Amino acid sequence: MSTTALDKDAIQKKYKAERDKRLRPEGNAQYKRLVEFEDLAQDPHSPWVDRAPVTDHVTFAFIGGGFAGLVVGAQLKQAGIDDFRVIEKGGDFGGTWYWNRYPGAQCDTASMIYMPLLEETGHMPSEKYAHAPEIREHCQRIANQFGLYDNALFQTEVTDLEWDDANSCWVVRTSRGDAFTAKYIGMGTGPLHVAKLPGIAGIETFKGKSFHTSRWDYDYTGGDPLGAPLANLADKRIALIGTGATSVQCVPHLAKSAKQLLVFQRTPSSVDARNNGPIDPDWFKSIAEPGWQQRWFDNFVENQSQGMPQVDLVMDGWTEISRRIREKVMSLPPSDWTPENMMMAFEDADFEKMEEIRNRVDSIVDDGETAENLKAWYRQLCKRPCFHDAYLQAFNEPGTQLVDTDGKGVERITETGVVVNGKEYEVDCIIYASGFEVGSDYTARAGFDMTGRDGQKLSEYWANGMRTQHGIQVHGFPNAFIVQPSQAANLISNVPHNIVDHAKTIAAIVSHSEAAGHAQVDVTKEAEDAWVELILSGAGMMIGSPDCTPGYYNNEGKGLTETNKYAVGHPGGAGAYFKHIAAWRESGAFDGLTFR
Protein backbone atom coordinates (compact mmCIF):
# COMPACT_ATOMS: atom_id res chain seq x y z
CA MET A 1 0.00 0.00 0.00
CA SER A 2 1.32 3.45 -0.90
CA THR A 3 1.34 6.24 1.68
CA THR A 4 -0.35 8.44 -0.92
CA ALA A 5 -3.52 6.39 -0.26
CA LEU A 6 -3.27 6.92 3.51
CA ASP A 7 -4.53 9.86 5.53
CA LYS A 8 -1.33 10.37 7.52
CA ASP A 9 -2.75 13.23 9.57
CA ALA A 10 -5.70 11.11 10.67
CA ILE A 11 -3.41 8.21 11.54
CA GLN A 12 -1.15 10.44 13.63
CA LYS A 13 -4.15 11.83 15.50
CA LYS A 14 -5.34 8.29 16.16
CA TYR A 15 -1.86 7.34 17.41
CA LYS A 16 -1.87 10.28 19.83
CA ALA A 17 -5.40 9.61 21.09
CA GLU A 18 -4.63 5.94 21.75
CA ARG A 19 -1.35 6.85 23.46
CA ASP A 20 -2.85 9.54 25.68
CA LYS A 21 -5.52 7.32 27.21
CA ARG A 22 -2.89 4.78 28.21
CA LEU A 23 -0.57 7.18 30.04
CA ARG A 24 -0.28 6.58 33.77
CA PRO A 25 1.42 9.07 36.10
CA GLU A 26 3.21 6.36 38.09
CA GLY A 27 5.14 5.07 35.06
CA ASN A 28 7.21 2.00 35.95
CA ALA A 29 6.00 2.25 39.55
CA GLN A 30 2.66 0.77 38.42
CA TYR A 31 4.23 -2.71 38.52
CA LYS A 32 5.04 -4.99 41.44
CA ARG A 33 7.76 -7.60 41.63
CA LEU A 34 6.66 -11.19 41.62
CA VAL A 35 8.88 -11.86 44.66
CA GLU A 36 6.55 -9.62 46.69
CA PHE A 37 4.03 -12.47 46.49
CA GLU A 38 5.77 -15.52 47.95
CA ASP A 39 3.18 -18.04 46.80
CA LEU A 40 3.43 -16.80 43.20
CA ALA A 41 7.22 -16.53 43.12
CA GLN A 42 8.07 -20.15 43.92
CA ASP A 43 10.10 -22.04 41.32
CA PRO A 44 7.90 -24.87 39.94
CA HIS A 45 10.64 -26.19 37.67
CA SER A 46 13.27 -27.58 40.09
CA PRO A 47 13.08 -28.98 43.63
CA TRP A 48 15.14 -27.16 46.25
CA VAL A 49 18.58 -28.68 46.87
CA ASP A 50 20.32 -28.05 50.18
CA ARG A 51 24.09 -27.52 50.16
CA ALA A 52 26.84 -26.19 52.42
CA PRO A 53 28.14 -22.63 51.92
CA VAL A 54 31.08 -22.25 49.53
CA THR A 55 34.21 -20.43 50.78
CA ASP A 56 36.84 -21.19 48.12
CA HIS A 57 38.57 -19.16 45.37
CA VAL A 58 38.00 -19.25 41.61
CA THR A 59 39.70 -17.48 38.74
CA PHE A 60 36.48 -16.21 37.17
CA ALA A 61 32.98 -16.01 38.65
CA PHE A 62 30.05 -15.12 36.41
CA ILE A 63 26.66 -13.97 37.69
CA GLY A 64 23.85 -15.33 35.54
CA GLY A 65 23.45 -18.72 33.87
CA GLY A 66 21.68 -17.55 30.73
CA PHE A 67 23.27 -17.06 27.32
CA ALA A 68 25.77 -14.57 28.77
CA GLY A 69 27.20 -16.94 31.38
CA LEU A 70 27.18 -19.85 28.95
CA VAL A 71 28.95 -18.05 26.11
CA VAL A 72 31.51 -16.25 28.30
CA GLY A 73 32.21 -19.56 30.05
CA ALA A 74 32.66 -21.36 26.73
CA GLN A 75 35.01 -18.67 25.40
CA LEU A 76 37.09 -18.66 28.57
CA LYS A 77 37.28 -22.45 28.66
CA GLN A 78 38.49 -22.42 25.05
CA ALA A 79 41.08 -19.81 26.08
CA GLY A 80 42.39 -22.10 28.83
CA ILE A 81 40.65 -20.50 31.83
CA ASP A 82 39.30 -23.68 33.41
CA ASP A 83 38.55 -22.34 36.89
CA PHE A 84 35.20 -20.78 35.97
CA ARG A 85 32.05 -20.60 38.10
CA VAL A 86 28.48 -19.54 37.28
CA ILE A 87 26.14 -18.29 40.01
CA GLU A 88 22.51 -18.66 38.91
CA LYS A 89 19.25 -18.10 40.82
CA GLY A 90 17.40 -20.72 38.77
CA GLY A 91 17.79 -24.46 39.16
CA ASP A 92 19.70 -24.93 35.88
CA PHE A 93 21.26 -23.04 33.00
CA GLY A 94 19.06 -21.11 30.60
CA GLY A 95 18.30 -17.72 32.13
CA THR A 96 15.00 -16.51 30.72
CA TRP A 97 14.68 -19.89 28.96
CA TYR A 98 14.88 -21.64 32.31
CA TRP A 99 11.89 -19.66 33.56
CA ASN A 100 9.80 -19.32 30.41
CA ARG A 101 8.23 -22.74 29.87
CA TYR A 102 4.73 -21.55 29.04
CA PRO A 103 3.03 -23.28 26.09
CA GLY A 104 4.12 -21.91 22.74
CA ALA A 105 7.22 -20.10 23.99
CA GLN A 106 9.74 -19.60 21.19
CA CYS A 107 12.41 -17.16 20.05
CA ASP A 108 11.21 -14.20 17.98
CA THR A 109 14.52 -13.77 16.14
CA ALA A 110 15.58 -16.50 13.72
CA SER A 111 17.18 -19.52 15.44
CA MET A 112 20.22 -19.44 13.16
CA ILE A 113 21.33 -16.16 14.73
CA TYR A 114 19.50 -16.34 18.05
CA MET A 115 20.91 -19.60 19.42
CA PRO A 116 24.60 -19.00 20.23
CA LEU A 117 27.47 -21.41 19.56
CA LEU A 118 25.58 -23.47 16.99
CA GLU A 119 28.73 -24.00 14.99
CA GLU A 120 30.79 -24.88 18.06
CA THR A 121 28.24 -27.45 19.27
CA GLY A 122 27.30 -28.78 15.83
CA HIS A 123 23.61 -28.25 16.49
CA MET A 124 21.11 -27.64 13.69
CA PRO A 125 17.97 -25.79 14.86
CA SER A 126 14.81 -27.75 14.05
CA GLU A 127 12.79 -24.66 13.05
CA LYS A 128 13.41 -21.15 11.77
CA TYR A 129 12.07 -20.00 15.17
CA ALA A 130 12.90 -22.67 17.73
CA HIS A 131 10.58 -23.38 20.63
CA ALA A 132 11.63 -23.05 24.25
CA PRO A 133 12.40 -26.72 25.03
CA GLU A 134 14.93 -26.85 22.19
CA ILE A 135 16.54 -23.60 23.31
CA ARG A 136 16.73 -24.82 26.90
CA GLU A 137 18.27 -28.10 25.73
CA HIS A 138 20.80 -26.10 23.74
CA CYS A 139 21.75 -24.22 26.90
CA GLN A 140 22.36 -27.54 28.62
CA ARG A 141 24.31 -28.76 25.57
CA ILE A 142 26.68 -25.78 25.83
CA ALA A 143 27.08 -26.25 29.57
CA ASN A 144 27.86 -29.95 29.18
CA GLN A 145 30.24 -29.53 26.26
CA PHE A 146 32.31 -26.88 28.02
CA GLY A 147 32.17 -28.35 31.52
CA LEU A 148 30.23 -25.47 33.04
CA TYR A 149 28.17 -27.64 35.41
CA ASP A 150 31.27 -28.68 37.35
CA ASN A 151 31.63 -25.52 39.41
CA ALA A 152 28.17 -23.93 39.10
CA LEU A 153 26.08 -22.70 42.03
CA PHE A 154 22.35 -22.94 41.23
CA GLN A 155 19.38 -21.65 43.25
CA THR A 156 21.76 -18.96 44.42
CA GLU A 157 21.57 -15.16 44.23
CA VAL A 158 24.51 -12.82 44.68
CA THR A 159 23.82 -10.34 47.47
CA ASP A 160 27.14 -8.47 47.59
CA LEU A 161 30.29 -7.94 45.53
CA GLU A 162 33.25 -6.13 47.05
CA TRP A 163 36.69 -5.47 45.57
CA ASP A 164 39.65 -6.44 47.78
CA ASP A 165 42.45 -4.30 46.39
CA ALA A 166 45.15 -5.71 48.64
CA ASN A 167 44.54 -9.22 47.34
CA SER A 168 43.41 -8.23 43.84
CA CYS A 169 40.17 -10.18 43.97
CA TRP A 170 36.44 -9.85 44.40
CA VAL A 171 34.64 -11.08 47.50
CA VAL A 172 31.35 -12.69 46.47
CA ARG A 173 28.54 -13.18 48.99
CA THR A 174 25.27 -14.93 48.22
CA SER A 175 21.82 -15.81 49.51
CA ARG A 176 23.12 -19.30 50.40
CA GLY A 177 25.74 -18.03 52.87
CA ASP A 178 28.58 -18.33 50.35
CA ALA A 179 31.59 -16.07 50.85
CA PHE A 180 34.19 -16.93 48.23
CA THR A 181 36.71 -14.93 46.20
CA ALA A 182 37.24 -14.57 42.46
CA LYS A 183 40.05 -12.88 40.59
CA TYR A 184 37.66 -11.77 37.86
CA ILE A 185 33.90 -11.34 37.82
CA GLY A 186 31.40 -11.07 35.01
CA MET A 187 27.80 -9.95 35.19
CA GLY A 188 25.11 -11.17 32.83
CA THR A 189 21.98 -10.22 34.75
CA GLY A 190 19.94 -9.37 31.68
CA PRO A 191 16.60 -7.56 31.50
CA LEU A 192 14.41 -10.67 31.38
CA HIS A 193 14.79 -12.30 34.77
CA VAL A 194 12.93 -10.15 37.34
CA ALA A 195 9.31 -11.13 36.78
CA LYS A 196 6.72 -8.42 37.38
CA LEU A 197 3.01 -8.19 38.02
CA PRO A 198 0.59 -5.40 37.13
CA GLY A 199 -0.17 -3.24 40.17
CA ILE A 200 -3.84 -4.20 40.24
CA ALA A 201 -5.72 -3.81 43.50
CA GLY A 202 -6.83 -7.09 45.00
CA ILE A 203 -4.28 -9.47 43.45
CA GLU A 204 -3.72 -11.10 46.83
CA THR A 205 -7.46 -11.62 47.45
CA PHE A 206 -8.21 -13.98 44.58
CA LYS A 207 -9.31 -17.39 45.90
CA GLY A 208 -8.84 -19.35 42.69
CA LYS A 209 -5.62 -20.46 41.01
CA SER A 210 -3.16 -17.84 39.75
CA PHE A 211 0.38 -17.82 38.41
CA HIS A 212 2.84 -15.82 36.30
CA THR A 213 3.70 -17.22 32.87
CA SER A 214 7.35 -17.66 33.96
CA ARG A 215 6.09 -19.98 36.73
CA TRP A 216 3.68 -21.96 34.54
CA ASP A 217 1.85 -24.63 36.55
CA TYR A 218 1.44 -27.69 34.32
CA ASP A 219 0.10 -29.67 37.29
CA TYR A 220 -2.92 -27.36 37.13
CA THR A 221 -3.25 -26.90 33.36
CA GLY A 222 -2.13 -30.29 32.15
CA GLY A 223 0.08 -30.54 29.10
CA ASP A 224 3.80 -29.83 28.99
CA PRO A 225 6.29 -27.38 27.43
CA LEU A 226 6.54 -29.62 24.35
CA GLY A 227 3.00 -28.69 23.34
CA ALA A 228 0.76 -31.43 24.72
CA PRO A 229 -2.85 -30.21 25.11
CA LEU A 230 -3.70 -28.40 28.35
CA ALA A 231 -6.30 -31.05 29.05
CA ASN A 232 -7.06 -30.04 32.64
CA LEU A 233 -8.56 -26.74 31.44
CA ALA A 234 -11.50 -28.32 29.61
CA ASP A 235 -13.88 -27.25 32.39
CA LYS A 236 -12.03 -24.09 33.47
CA ARG A 237 -12.63 -20.37 32.92
CA ILE A 238 -9.24 -18.73 32.40
CA ALA A 239 -8.31 -15.05 32.60
CA LEU A 240 -5.09 -14.00 30.88
CA ILE A 241 -3.88 -10.53 31.77
CA GLY A 242 -1.44 -9.06 29.27
CA THR A 243 -1.20 -8.99 25.48
CA GLY A 244 2.53 -8.68 24.82
CA ALA A 245 4.88 -11.22 23.23
CA THR A 246 4.21 -13.87 25.89
CA SER A 247 0.46 -13.68 25.44
CA VAL A 248 0.81 -13.81 21.66
CA GLN A 249 2.57 -17.15 22.02
CA CYS A 250 0.45 -18.83 24.70
CA VAL A 251 -3.07 -17.63 23.75
CA PRO A 252 -3.47 -20.14 20.88
CA HIS A 253 -2.79 -23.05 23.25
CA LEU A 254 -5.15 -21.74 25.92
CA ALA A 255 -7.85 -21.02 23.35
CA LYS A 256 -7.80 -24.63 22.13
CA SER A 257 -7.97 -26.14 25.62
CA ALA A 258 -9.94 -23.92 28.01
CA LYS A 259 -13.70 -23.98 28.43
CA GLN A 260 -13.52 -20.19 28.35
CA LEU A 261 -10.54 -17.89 27.78
CA LEU A 262 -10.84 -14.19 28.60
CA VAL A 263 -7.90 -12.14 27.31
CA PHE A 264 -7.69 -8.80 29.14
CA GLN A 265 -6.04 -6.18 26.97
CA ARG A 266 -4.75 -2.72 27.72
CA THR A 267 -2.73 -2.25 24.51
CA PRO A 268 -2.77 -4.61 21.52
CA SER A 269 0.48 -5.92 20.08
CA SER A 270 1.31 -5.50 16.42
CA VAL A 271 1.25 -9.07 15.11
CA ASP A 272 2.70 -9.74 11.69
CA ALA A 273 3.07 -13.13 10.00
CA ARG A 274 5.70 -15.47 11.48
CA ASN A 275 5.98 -17.96 8.63
CA ASN A 276 7.75 -20.48 10.81
CA GLY A 277 8.75 -23.87 9.46
CA PRO A 278 11.23 -26.72 9.81
CA ILE A 279 14.85 -26.32 8.72
CA ASP A 280 15.81 -28.69 5.93
CA PRO A 281 18.87 -30.79 6.95
CA ASP A 282 20.25 -30.91 3.39
CA TRP A 283 20.01 -27.14 3.08
CA PHE A 284 21.64 -26.68 6.48
CA LYS A 285 24.48 -29.00 5.54
CA SER A 286 25.07 -26.94 2.39
CA ILE A 287 25.48 -23.67 4.31
CA ALA A 288 27.16 -24.92 7.51
CA GLU A 289 30.71 -24.27 6.38
CA PRO A 290 33.37 -22.96 8.80
CA GLY A 291 32.43 -19.50 10.07
CA TRP A 292 28.84 -19.78 8.89
CA GLN A 293 27.14 -18.41 12.01
CA GLN A 294 29.37 -15.35 12.17
CA ARG A 295 28.55 -14.68 8.53
CA TRP A 296 24.84 -14.86 9.41
CA PHE A 297 25.37 -12.53 12.37
CA ASP A 298 27.15 -10.02 10.15
CA ASN A 299 24.59 -10.30 7.37
CA PHE A 300 21.70 -9.67 9.77
CA VAL A 301 23.40 -6.50 11.02
CA GLU A 302 24.24 -5.39 7.50
CA ASN A 303 20.61 -5.78 6.47
CA GLN A 304 19.51 -3.49 9.28
CA SER A 305 21.89 -0.75 8.21
CA GLN A 306 21.22 1.81 5.52
CA GLY A 307 23.78 0.31 3.16
CA MET A 308 23.03 -1.86 0.13
CA PRO A 309 23.47 -5.50 1.14
CA GLN A 310 23.55 -7.96 -1.75
CA VAL A 311 21.68 -10.73 0.05
CA ASP A 312 19.39 -11.17 3.07
CA LEU A 313 20.17 -14.55 4.64
CA VAL A 314 17.68 -14.25 7.51
CA MET A 315 14.66 -12.80 5.68
CA ASP A 316 12.50 -11.88 8.68
CA GLY A 317 10.42 -9.01 9.98
CA TRP A 318 13.46 -7.16 11.29
CA THR A 319 15.30 -7.09 7.99
CA GLU A 320 12.05 -6.21 6.21
CA ILE A 321 11.76 -3.03 8.28
CA SER A 322 15.14 -1.83 7.04
CA ARG A 323 14.54 -3.06 3.49
CA ARG A 324 11.39 -0.97 3.26
CA ILE A 325 13.21 2.12 4.49
CA ARG A 326 16.05 1.60 1.99
CA GLU A 327 13.58 1.25 -0.85
CA LYS A 328 11.89 4.50 0.17
CA VAL A 329 15.22 6.33 0.35
CA MET A 330 16.44 4.91 -2.96
CA SER A 331 13.26 6.10 -4.64
CA LEU A 332 14.40 9.66 -3.90
CA PRO A 333 16.86 11.48 -6.17
CA PRO A 334 20.35 11.54 -4.54
CA SER A 335 20.07 15.30 -4.07
CA ASP A 336 17.19 14.66 -1.64
CA TRP A 337 19.12 12.25 0.61
CA THR A 338 19.01 14.56 3.60
CA PRO A 339 18.52 13.47 7.24
CA GLU A 340 15.05 15.03 7.18
CA ASN A 341 14.01 13.18 4.03
CA MET A 342 15.43 9.92 5.36
CA MET A 343 13.36 10.30 8.52
CA MET A 344 10.32 10.99 6.35
CA ALA A 345 11.09 7.84 4.34
CA PHE A 346 11.29 5.89 7.60
CA GLU A 347 7.92 7.29 8.67
CA ASP A 348 6.27 6.54 5.33
CA ALA A 349 7.57 2.97 5.33
CA ASP A 350 6.24 2.55 8.85
CA PHE A 351 2.81 3.95 7.99
CA GLU A 352 2.52 1.45 5.14
CA LYS A 353 3.69 -1.51 7.21
CA MET A 354 1.41 -0.79 10.15
CA GLU A 355 -1.57 -0.39 7.81
CA GLU A 356 -0.74 -3.82 6.39
CA ILE A 357 -0.60 -5.27 9.91
CA ARG A 358 -3.96 -3.72 10.81
CA ASN A 359 -5.48 -5.02 7.55
CA ARG A 360 -4.14 -8.46 8.42
CA VAL A 361 -6.31 -8.40 11.55
CA ASP A 362 -9.41 -7.77 9.44
CA SER A 363 -8.50 -10.63 7.10
CA ILE A 364 -8.22 -13.14 9.95
CA VAL A 365 -10.54 -12.20 12.83
CA ASP A 366 -14.22 -12.90 12.17
CA ASP A 367 -15.85 -10.58 14.72
CA GLY A 368 -15.62 -6.96 13.60
CA GLU A 369 -15.48 -5.39 17.07
CA THR A 370 -12.81 -7.82 18.23
CA ALA A 371 -10.78 -7.17 15.09
CA GLU A 372 -10.97 -3.42 15.62
CA ASN A 373 -9.77 -3.75 19.20
CA LEU A 374 -6.84 -5.95 18.16
CA LYS A 375 -5.41 -3.29 15.86
CA ALA A 376 -2.19 -1.59 16.96
CA TRP A 377 -2.33 2.18 16.58
CA TYR A 378 1.32 3.13 16.99
CA ARG A 379 4.56 2.91 15.04
CA GLN A 380 5.99 -0.58 14.65
CA LEU A 381 9.04 0.08 16.83
CA CYS A 382 7.07 1.78 19.61
CA LYS A 383 6.74 -1.69 21.12
CA ARG A 384 8.53 -4.96 20.51
CA PRO A 385 7.16 -6.16 17.14
CA CYS A 386 5.42 -9.54 17.35
CA PHE A 387 5.09 -12.22 14.70
CA HIS A 388 2.73 -15.19 14.93
CA ASP A 389 0.63 -17.42 12.71
CA ALA A 390 -2.01 -18.54 15.25
CA TYR A 391 -2.59 -15.67 17.73
CA LEU A 392 -5.19 -13.70 15.79
CA GLN A 393 -6.86 -16.92 14.66
CA ALA A 394 -7.37 -17.90 18.32
CA PHE A 395 -10.00 -15.17 18.69
CA ASN A 396 -12.21 -17.09 16.28
CA GLU A 397 -12.45 -19.93 18.81
CA PRO A 398 -15.97 -19.96 20.31
CA GLY A 399 -14.72 -19.95 23.92
CA THR A 400 -12.22 -17.11 23.48
CA GLN A 401 -13.17 -13.52 24.24
CA LEU A 402 -11.09 -10.36 24.07
CA VAL A 403 -11.89 -8.02 26.95
CA ASP A 404 -10.57 -4.68 25.77
CA THR A 405 -10.10 -2.16 28.59
CA ASP A 406 -9.78 0.85 26.26
CA GLY A 407 -6.28 1.51 27.52
CA LYS A 408 -7.24 1.64 31.19
CA GLY A 409 -6.21 -1.86 32.22
CA VAL A 410 -7.93 -4.10 34.74
CA GLU A 411 -9.74 -2.14 37.45
CA ARG A 412 -9.34 -4.65 40.29
CA ILE A 413 -9.33 -8.31 41.19
CA THR A 414 -11.83 -9.86 43.58
CA GLU A 415 -11.99 -13.19 45.38
CA THR A 416 -13.76 -14.70 42.37
CA GLY A 417 -12.69 -12.78 39.29
CA VAL A 418 -11.53 -9.75 37.35
CA VAL A 419 -13.27 -6.37 37.17
CA VAL A 420 -13.13 -4.15 34.07
CA ASN A 421 -15.24 -1.01 33.68
CA GLY A 422 -17.30 -2.01 36.70
CA LYS A 423 -18.14 -5.47 35.32
CA GLU A 424 -16.86 -8.58 37.09
CA TYR A 425 -15.78 -11.59 35.06
CA GLU A 426 -15.81 -14.69 37.26
CA VAL A 427 -12.95 -17.08 36.52
CA ASP A 428 -11.28 -20.16 37.97
CA CYS A 429 -7.71 -19.14 37.16
CA ILE A 430 -5.79 -15.91 36.47
CA ILE A 431 -2.59 -16.12 34.43
CA TYR A 432 -0.35 -13.05 34.45
CA ALA A 433 1.44 -12.55 31.12
CA SER A 434 3.00 -9.35 32.42
CA GLY A 435 6.62 -9.95 31.53
CA PHE A 436 9.79 -8.82 33.24
CA GLU A 437 11.20 -5.67 34.77
CA VAL A 438 13.12 -3.66 32.18
CA GLY A 439 13.00 0.03 33.11
CA SER A 440 14.59 -0.14 36.57
CA ASP A 441 18.16 0.83 37.47
CA TYR A 442 20.80 -1.78 36.70
CA THR A 443 21.79 -2.37 40.32
CA ALA A 444 18.17 -2.62 41.46
CA ARG A 445 17.44 -5.21 38.80
CA ALA A 446 20.66 -7.13 39.45
CA GLY A 447 19.85 -7.46 43.15
CA PHE A 448 23.24 -6.26 44.38
CA ASP A 449 25.32 -3.09 44.30
CA MET A 450 28.99 -3.86 43.70
CA THR A 451 31.67 -1.97 45.63
CA GLY A 452 34.79 -1.10 43.66
CA ARG A 453 38.06 0.53 44.50
CA ASP A 454 38.09 2.96 47.47
CA GLY A 455 34.58 1.92 48.51
CA GLN A 456 32.93 3.33 45.37
CA LYS A 457 29.44 1.88 44.79
CA LEU A 458 28.39 1.25 41.19
CA SER A 459 25.03 2.92 41.88
CA GLU A 460 26.89 6.05 43.01
CA TYR A 461 29.26 6.01 40.06
CA TRP A 462 26.34 5.67 37.66
CA ALA A 463 24.04 8.08 39.51
CA ASN A 464 24.12 10.50 36.57
CA GLY A 465 24.18 7.82 33.89
CA MET A 466 25.99 4.69 32.82
CA ARG A 467 29.74 5.02 32.17
CA THR A 468 31.85 2.31 30.54
CA GLN A 469 34.40 1.61 27.89
CA HIS A 470 32.89 -0.51 25.11
CA GLY A 471 29.88 -1.23 27.34
CA ILE A 472 31.99 -3.83 29.17
CA GLN A 473 34.36 -2.29 31.74
CA VAL A 474 33.93 0.47 34.32
CA HIS A 475 36.73 2.64 35.69
CA GLY A 476 37.47 1.91 39.34
CA PHE A 477 36.00 -1.60 39.17
CA PRO A 478 39.05 -3.70 38.23
CA ASN A 479 38.79 -7.22 36.85
CA ALA A 480 35.03 -6.77 36.35
CA PHE A 481 33.09 -7.20 33.12
CA ILE A 482 29.47 -6.48 32.18
CA VAL A 483 27.64 -8.30 29.40
CA GLN A 484 24.78 -6.19 28.00
CA PRO A 485 24.07 -4.20 24.81
CA SER A 486 24.21 -0.55 25.96
CA GLN A 487 27.19 1.67 25.11
CA ALA A 488 28.20 -1.07 22.69
CA ALA A 489 26.35 -2.43 19.64
CA ASN A 490 22.94 -1.93 21.30
CA LEU A 491 21.52 -4.47 18.85
CA ILE A 492 18.10 -5.02 20.42
CA SER A 493 16.80 -7.08 17.49
CA ASN A 494 19.25 -9.88 18.33
CA VAL A 495 20.67 -9.63 21.83
CA PRO A 496 22.69 -12.90 21.59
CA HIS A 497 24.95 -11.30 18.96
CA ASN A 498 25.89 -8.66 21.54
CA ILE A 499 26.61 -11.42 24.06
CA VAL A 500 28.78 -13.48 21.70
CA ASP A 501 30.85 -10.45 20.79
CA HIS A 502 31.32 -9.33 24.42
CA ALA A 503 32.43 -12.85 25.32
CA LYS A 504 35.17 -12.66 22.69
CA THR A 505 36.38 -9.36 24.13
CA ILE A 506 36.34 -10.62 27.71
CA ALA A 507 38.24 -13.78 26.76
CA ALA A 508 40.84 -11.71 24.89
CA ILE A 509 41.42 -9.37 27.85
CA VAL A 510 41.55 -12.11 30.48
CA SER A 511 43.82 -14.30 28.34
CA HIS A 512 46.23 -11.40 27.85
CA SER A 513 46.20 -10.55 31.54
CA GLU A 514 46.79 -14.15 32.64
CA ALA A 515 49.53 -14.82 30.08
CA ALA A 516 51.42 -11.75 31.27
CA GLY A 517 50.94 -12.58 34.94
CA HIS A 518 49.02 -9.41 35.76
CA ALA A 519 46.99 -9.11 38.95
CA GLN A 520 44.62 -6.36 37.83
CA VAL A 521 43.13 -4.85 34.69
CA ASP A 522 41.15 -1.61 34.72
CA VAL A 523 39.98 0.96 32.19
CA THR A 524 41.43 4.46 32.54
CA LYS A 525 39.17 7.40 33.34
CA GLU A 526 40.35 9.15 30.19
CA ALA A 527 39.44 6.19 27.97
CA GLU A 528 36.06 5.80 29.63
CA ASP A 529 35.30 9.52 29.23
CA ALA A 530 36.29 9.42 25.57
CA TRP A 531 34.06 6.42 24.92
CA VAL A 532 31.05 7.99 26.64
CA GLU A 533 31.61 11.18 24.66
CA LEU A 534 31.66 9.13 21.46
CA ILE A 535 28.48 7.20 22.13
CA LEU A 536 26.65 10.41 23.10
CA SER A 537 27.66 12.05 19.82
CA GLY A 538 25.13 10.07 17.81
CA ALA A 539 21.49 10.74 17.06
CA GLY A 540 20.30 8.79 20.10
CA MET A 541 17.78 5.99 20.23
CA MET A 542 15.53 5.23 17.27
CA ILE A 543 13.08 3.84 19.81
CA GLY A 544 11.91 5.20 23.14
CA SER A 545 10.09 8.29 21.91
CA PRO A 546 7.64 9.67 24.50
CA ASP A 547 5.06 10.15 21.72
CA CYS A 548 4.81 6.36 21.44
CA THR A 549 2.19 4.37 23.30
CA PRO A 550 3.53 3.52 26.78
CA GLY A 551 5.77 0.50 27.18
CA TYR A 552 9.25 -0.48 28.30
CA TYR A 553 10.82 1.01 25.15
CA ASN A 554 9.86 4.54 26.24
CA ASN A 555 9.90 4.32 30.03
CA GLU A 556 6.12 3.71 30.14
CA GLY A 557 5.41 6.86 28.15
CA LYS A 558 7.56 9.19 30.21
CA GLY A 559 10.32 9.23 27.60
CA LEU A 560 14.03 8.81 28.17
CA THR A 561 15.42 10.49 31.29
CA GLU A 562 18.80 12.19 31.60
CA THR A 563 20.28 8.90 32.73
CA ASN A 564 18.47 6.87 30.04
CA LYS A 565 20.23 8.84 27.32
CA TYR A 566 23.46 7.03 28.21
CA ALA A 567 21.92 3.65 27.33
CA VAL A 568 22.67 4.05 23.63
CA GLY A 569 25.02 2.34 21.22
CA HIS A 570 27.83 3.28 18.87
CA PRO A 571 26.86 6.37 16.81
CA GLY A 572 27.68 4.46 13.64
CA GLY A 573 25.30 1.65 14.50
CA ALA A 574 25.78 -1.97 15.52
CA GLY A 575 27.95 -2.82 12.53
CA ALA A 576 30.32 0.03 13.29
CA TYR A 577 30.70 -1.13 16.87
CA PHE A 578 31.40 -4.74 15.90
CA LYS A 579 34.06 -3.61 13.43
CA HIS A 580 35.64 -1.28 15.98
CA ILE A 581 35.79 -3.83 18.80
CA ALA A 582 37.09 -6.61 16.53
CA ALA A 583 39.98 -4.39 15.43
CA TRP A 584 40.58 -3.35 19.06
CA ARG A 585 40.78 -6.98 20.17
CA GLU A 586 42.92 -8.14 17.29
CA SER A 587 45.48 -5.34 17.69
CA GLY A 588 46.57 -6.78 21.03
CA ALA A 589 47.25 -3.27 22.33
CA PHE A 590 44.09 -3.06 24.46
CA ASP A 591 44.00 0.72 24.24
CA GLY A 592 42.42 2.34 27.28
CA LEU A 593 43.27 -0.47 29.69
CA THR A 594 45.94 -0.58 32.37
CA PHE A 595 47.41 -3.89 33.52
CA ARG A 596 49.46 -4.30 36.67
Image: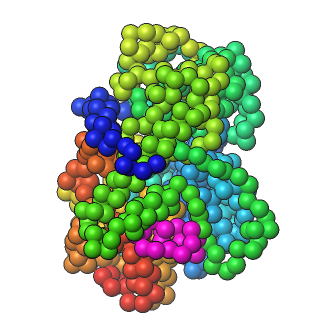
- In-front residue for pair 457/374: 374
The residue segment tinted magenta is 294-312
Task: Identify whether 574 is placed above or below 138.
Answer: below
- In-front residue for pair 543/198: 543
In the figure, residue 33 lies in which quadrant?
A: top left
Q: Residue at x 75, y 68 (%)?
A: 283
- In-front residue for pair 512/340: 340
In the figure, residue 122 lies in which quadrant?
A: bottom right
Taking the magenta stretch, the answer to whether it contains residue 346 is: no
- In-front residue for pair 4/277: 4
Tag count in the figure? 0
Q: Residue at x 59, y 51 (%)?
A: 107
**Can see residue 565?**
yes
Which quarter of the image is occupied by the C terminus? Answer: bottom left
Farthest residue in the right direction? 282
Farthest residue in the front direction? 5
Residue 237: percent from left, percent from top: 61, 16
Task: Identify whether 116 is placed above or below 23.
Answer: below
Task: Identify whether 306 is placed above or below 125.
Answer: below
Residue 324 is left or right of residue 344, and the answer is right
Q: Residue at x 62, y 32 (%)?
A: 393
**Can see residue 48?**
no
Residue 138 is left or right of residue 79, and the answer is right
Taking the magenta stretch, the answer to whether it contains residue 305 is: yes
Residue 396: percent from left, percent from top: 63, 25
Residue 227: percent from left, percent from top: 72, 38
